[in-house]
Image (cartoon, helix red, strand yellow):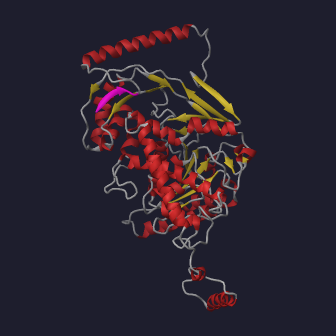
């Protein structure tokens, strides 16, 4: 494992003594520079966003971080093999953290707040804290839990006003070393890194990547989902499918939450969570078969495009009416609770329901929250607050502090998270799932994100929001760009590798789409299947009447 400053050239090796001397000089130099800067401020009062440029754009503020990279010395740190979690944590606190702290003289200012659609200035926190019903709620605006900033660097503690760009470089593609490096660099996130499934290799290679590297699979799947969205959206514009909805800008929610769930957990999605299904193993061919409603469509052509479902993957079929899945998820969670009581040795399962900020205005949302809280059902309410419910902005949707502020009123635990931070979403969902199982109670998560695309192919968002607003969100807070930067910092990704993955996924999507498009539609008899376990007489009669009608007019079927 190597320690160096990311973005600077390697320099000659040096001893720990010379490293210490270099560090002291750099710290002294920085303090002198800061003193000069302070003396020229004329007693200026600094805002909560120091050394940042904030720009408003129709309801959202973008924070740009200015940084200067200084060449850093290089030294070697012994590589870590597999370790016992408790021993590693003790070592971090007692031995390694002080040594790493000595390297932290190269800093970047980081935002303490950020603004979101609706002009709500939200504080950012590095503390993973689910507020329980019996605890005092946060005063003022609920904070947003974040681990990784837009720069791809992890944050320091809330009391620190800087982040550090010095990196401990693990062996490429070695998840164990990466996990150790992150713990050494950011010990305040040690619990999150130790329990993060994204930093654990799979026991077997994933069929869709032919690799056991979970983190790189998340990266590839975010690219795959984006390529699938672009190509199938264009296919709808060409008249090849009837409808489509993209997920641009929300991919971190899908891969972050999907990777924190267990296979036995049941997913009740709304319509913009295809990445969760992709993470569970739904193939490009299956996505395309559903959108083209062919004979291999698991729904047998009965649903409009993007209304996916898979019994094998515990992903309930999407319903078009808004909010209906929320109450259904409560019923499933109550069944899981009864199962746990009857068979405590069985591995626990929860339900997770996804919905948007608009669906939180439905009566189904209220009914579901009240039932879940009073019945103590093990589940997660996951709100994707992306700023708009079709054309309705959040300032017209609610007057309070988003959706998460409603959780205490129902007697429900809750947390707000940066929905564009893959690691923060994963950590929040993993912690929420643990609480839901142990306490047999619901947990609400509000993920703050931004819908970069139109609501659907039936929508033109330029009619109700400024295109500059969309472009700013894309440039500043895109989750895939943030994840790319993180991987590049550690030398796990570069522009050529990313472009190669994009080409591979684009070709894979096109092949799956073309194969799905050439297949025939579902057979006529499937129309009368699955409604009843056994066909009743009146359904048999209707099927026979239809066949006679088609035969009479020579209509092929």
Give the extent of the magenta segment: 1-6
3 within the magenta span = yes
The quarter of the rendered structure image containing the N terminus is top left
Q: Is residue 58 visible?
A: yes
Query: Percent from the top left, x then y, of residue 199?
Result: 37, 45
Q: Is residue 210 left or right of residue 484?
A: left
Foreground: 198 or 248? Answer: 248
Asked if 342 appears above or below 102 in the picture, the reply is: below
Q: Is residue 277 visible?
A: no
Foreground: 500 or 465? Answer: 500
Q: Is residue 119 left or right of residue 182?
A: right
Query: Percent from the top left, x then y, of residue 443?
Result: 53, 52
| Main secondary structure type of the part rendered in magenta | strand
Tell me what residue is drawn at x 61 percent, y 54 percent: 234
Total marks placed: 0
Foreground: 326 or 203? Answer: 203
Query: Percent from the top left, x then y, of residue 123?
Result: 58, 34
Tell me what residue is drawn at x 59 percent, y 55 percent: 272
Foreground: 484 or 137? Answer: 484
- Residue 192 location, quadrant: top left
Asked if 521 appears above or below 512 in the picture, the reply is: below
Tell me what residue is drawn at x 41 percent, y 38 percent: 487
218 within the magenta span = no
The quarter of the rendered structure image containing the C terminus is bottom right
- Residue 73 location, quadrant: top left
Query: Percent from the top left, x then y, of residue 35?
Result: 50, 9
């Amino acid at each position: 494992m190597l320690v160096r400053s990311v973005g600077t050239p390697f320099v000659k090796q040096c001893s720990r003594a010379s490293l210490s001397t270099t560090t002291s000089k750099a710290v002294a130099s920085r303090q002198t520079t800061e003193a000069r800067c302070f003396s020229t401020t004329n007693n200026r009062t600094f805002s909560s966003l120091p050394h940042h440029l904030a720009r408003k754009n129709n309801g959202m503020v973008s924070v740009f971080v200015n940084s200067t990279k200084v060449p850093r010395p290089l030294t070697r740190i012994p590589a870590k093999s597999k370790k016992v979690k408790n021993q590693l944590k003790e070592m971090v606190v007692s031995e390694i953290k002080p040594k790493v702290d000595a390297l932290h003289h190269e800093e970047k200012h980081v935002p303490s707040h950020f603004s979101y659609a609706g002009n709500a200035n939200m504080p950012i926190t590095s503390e993973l804290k689910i507020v329980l019903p019996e605890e005092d709620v946060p005063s003022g605006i609920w904070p947003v839990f974040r681990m990784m900033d837009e720069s791809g660097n992890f944050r320091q503690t809330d009391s620190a006003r800087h982040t550090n760009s010095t990196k401990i470089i693990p062996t490429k593609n070695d998840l164990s070393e990466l996990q150790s490096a992150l713990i050494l660099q950011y010990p305040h996130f040690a619990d999150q890194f130790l329990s993060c499934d994204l930093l654990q290799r799979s026991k077997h290679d994933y069929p869709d990547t032919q690799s056991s590297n979970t983190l790189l699979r998340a990266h590839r799947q975010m690219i795959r989902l984006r390529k699938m969205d672009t190509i199938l959206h264009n296919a709808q514009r060409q008249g090849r499918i009837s409808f489509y909805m993209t997920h641009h800008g929300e991919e971190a929610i899908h891969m972050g939450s999907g990777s924190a769930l267990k296979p036995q957990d049941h997913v009740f999605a709304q319509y913009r969570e295809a990445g969760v299904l992709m993470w569970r193993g739904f193939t490009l061919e299956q996505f395309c078969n559903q959108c083209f409603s062919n004979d291999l469509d698991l729904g047998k052509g009965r649903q409009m495009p993007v209304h996916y479902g898979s019994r094998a993957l515990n992903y309930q079929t999407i319903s078009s009416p808004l909010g209906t899945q929320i109450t259904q998820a409560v019923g499933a969670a109550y069944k899981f609770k009864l199962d746990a009581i009857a068979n405590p040795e069985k591995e626990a399962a929860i339900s997770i329901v996804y919905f948007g900020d608009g669906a939180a205005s439905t009566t189904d949302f209220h009914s579901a929250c009240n039932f879940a809280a009073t019945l103590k059902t093990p589940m997660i309410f996951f709100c994707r607050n992306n700023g708009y419910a079709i054309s309705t902005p959040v300032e017209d949707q609610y007057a309070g502090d988003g959706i998460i502020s409603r959780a205490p009123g129902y007697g429900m635990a809750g947390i707000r998270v940066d929905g564009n931070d893959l690691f923060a979403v994963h950590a929040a969902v993993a912690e929420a799932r643990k609480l839901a199982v142990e306490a047999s109670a619901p947990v609400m998560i509000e993920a703050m994100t931004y819908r970069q695309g139109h609501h659907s192919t039936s929508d033109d968002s330029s009619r109700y929001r400024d295109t500059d607003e969309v472009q700013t969100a894309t440039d500043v807070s895109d989750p895939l760009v943030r994840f790319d930067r993180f991987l590049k910092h550690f030398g796990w990704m570069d522009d050529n590798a990313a472009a190669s993955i994009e080409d591979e996924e684009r070709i894979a999507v096109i092949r799956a789409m073309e194969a799905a498009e050439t297949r025939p539609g579902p057979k006529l008899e499937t129309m009368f299947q699955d409604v009843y376990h056994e066909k009743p007489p009146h359904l048999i009669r209707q099927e026979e009447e239809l066949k006679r009608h088609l035969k009479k007019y020579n209509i092929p079927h």
